[in-house]
Amino acid sequence: MNMLNPILARLNKMPRAALITIGLFVALGTFAPWLAPQDPSTQNLLEAGLGPSAAHWLGTDHLGRDTFSRLIIAANTSLVSVGSVLGIAMTIGILLGTIAGYHRGWVDDVLMRVVDVGLSVPSLIISLAVIGIVGPGYWTMVLALALAWWPMSGRISRAVAVSIMSKPHIEALRVLGASPWRIYFCHLLPGTIGSVMVYATADAGTAALAVATLSFLGLGIQPPTPEWGQMLVDALPYLESDPRQVLLPGLALTAAVIGFNTLGESIALNRVPKPLTRRMLAARRAEVASWSKENSDA
Amino acid sequence: MTNSPVLKVENLQTRFKSVQRGKFIHAVDDVSIELYPGEIVGLVGESGCGKSTLGRTIVGLEKASAGRVLLDGVDLSTLSGAALRKSRRALQYVFQDPYSCLNDRQTVGEAIDEALLIDGRSSQDERDRRTKELLDQVGLANAVKDRHTRELSGGQRQRVAIARSLAVNPRVLICDEPVSALDLSIRAQVMNLFLRLQKDLGVACLFIAHDLALVRQAASRVYVMYLGKIVEQGPSQELYDHPSHPYSQMLLASVPEVDPRVEKLRNGPLLVGEVPSPTNPPSGCRFRTRCPLAVESCSRKMPAAHGLSFGHSAACLFAPELHEGRRSALH
């Protein structure tokens, strides 16, 4: 329990609503197959387009599938695809960014020009181009988005890596005779990952939106796998007669995106030290003083 | 002092590319210094005269464009890769800023442990024992080893930095203004600790500082540097009593006195103006643009070092006269 305390204290500082939303999203996404009350793909045309009832808590869609179950399974789809997109993009970005930041010189120049090219084209257009060439599909979409996403994290990691490399503690390691491997893997990489992860949280919302957008356009997740963007497009013809079918996946998507953005922002803000109160300062001073041995320099 | 120098720097030159195309900043220009085992040597000069660059070049943080660094007679430029890192480990550097020279993500124990690990000690027990010993040597309780370095005060951090440098058993310590970032009260503590450790361990030390009083107290010999060149060198007592280069004289005269009555009597030429740009240094003697004694021949060539007394020399045409205190005779 003691191990958990610092984590709990840290969580306590974040906006609770965003934390709960994202917690719910992650929990639902992870355990979706066990949580969904009904099979999300079972059609029952006799019950199509019905409102909420005891059998279907949030009603059914135009094919009579249980909306609640579909929303939950869609959370899983979204979580996995966003996770894979960011995972792949961050890995490529951090790897190339830190290599550029470590080496500088021509390696830096070449890698950053590649990043510039990547950044100059809007990410959705790159994804559309890749999907257009390879053909729509789940993993195509993940790869296409990752391909569009990595230049951003590459640029950020490079900036972070450069600032870490110019710090005297890296110079101190050089003087101690640390091998380049030790400097790269024990100091540069962990430091960069820590900082870039913050951006990843804020990016997760945008990535979720991009996944939904591609699925909405029919280029991402293919039916019958439930996905929020795809549920939206399915329900679009019934927008006027039964707005519930559009609103529910729309709300779920909005909550996830806003949750991620708020959370990312608060993590970034939490990294800025807050002013200390007088009591905190006094306690701190007493503790620090106890570390030095008395009269050790006499 | 009679044995061979542990560190010998021969005609070292460091230059950086200037923002102006094709021009170079000559930060360190043709500098030769020697350090004997167990002695503290001061290196003084104004800001921007190349003191730190000289120190950084010696430990390999900057690339020398010419010259050699010999450690125990071994030319470091002939080594490379792991062999270079291993040899250079005997040369350690204490940074000016105790806040940024330690990794915030590490605890004190981890920082020192890493240095020991780099030094090739594979046994965890031995490293733990040595860490405890080192912390004890720098006057920190063993409990500090589980603290993150960011939680420590400036003085405590500098102690940790010193402990880390000592972890690899260096033969030469290059201290780049190690106490100038600290409070005055802490400064004395850390300085005393440093002097005691230096004496106990017999490490040779190049002490870079702009605090002349501190250097006088600590160092047995002093080098005075101006615009990338050593202008005067000598035993500190001798040099402080008989500064023989106009620059050294002015540098020493510029130190204010604490006692206002003494301060009122303080006379002598004061330094005016700024150090000229090292991109385009003056011809001949580098100091001639600010020197009150400069004559026409100063601009032709850099004056050779005049030997004045044992170990004391100054690179000035008038060094013998200045050494004898006959400054007025020159005007």
Image (cartoon, rainbow, N blue to C red):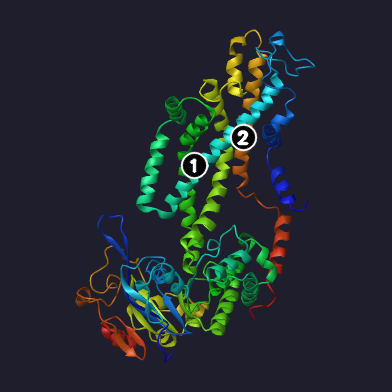
Relative to A230, residue A189 above or below: below
Under mark 1, the amino acid is: Ser
Q: Residue A84 in the image: x percent, y percent?
A: 56, 37
Quadrant location, the N terminus of chain B = bottom left
Query: Which class describes the residues within 10 Å of circle 1: few (<14), some (14-19), or many (20+)?
Result: many
User: Mark 2 sits on what residue?
Assistant: A260
Query: Which class describes the residues within 10 Å of circle 2: few (<14), some (14-19), or many (20+)?
Result: many
Q: Residue A16 in the image: x percent, y percent?
A: 71, 37
Near-viewer residue (B241 or A194): A194
Relative to A76, residue B305 above or below: below
Whether pointer 2 and pointer 1 mark residues with C-beta atoms closer than 8 Å, the reply is no
Near-viewer residue (A221 or B97): A221
Q: Secondary structure at mark 1?
A: helix
Residue visible at 41% across and 36% down in the picture:
A118
Chain ID of residue with mark 1: A
Q: Quadrant of residue B11?
A: bottom left
Near-viewer residue (B216 or A118): A118
Q: Residue A96 in the image: x percent, y percent?
A: 45, 47
Residue visible at 29% across and 86% down in the picture:
B306
C-alpha gap between disc 2 and disc 1: 17 Å
In the rendered structure, find residue B212 and report the number of the disc placed on it. Answer: none
Relative placement, left or right, of A163 versus A248 is left
Does residue A255 show up? no
Q: Residue A283 in the image: x percent, y percent?
A: 73, 60
Does residue A69 show up? yes
Under mark 2, the amino acid is: Phe
User: Mark 1 sits on what residue?
Assistant: A153
Q: Secondary structure at mark 2?
A: helix
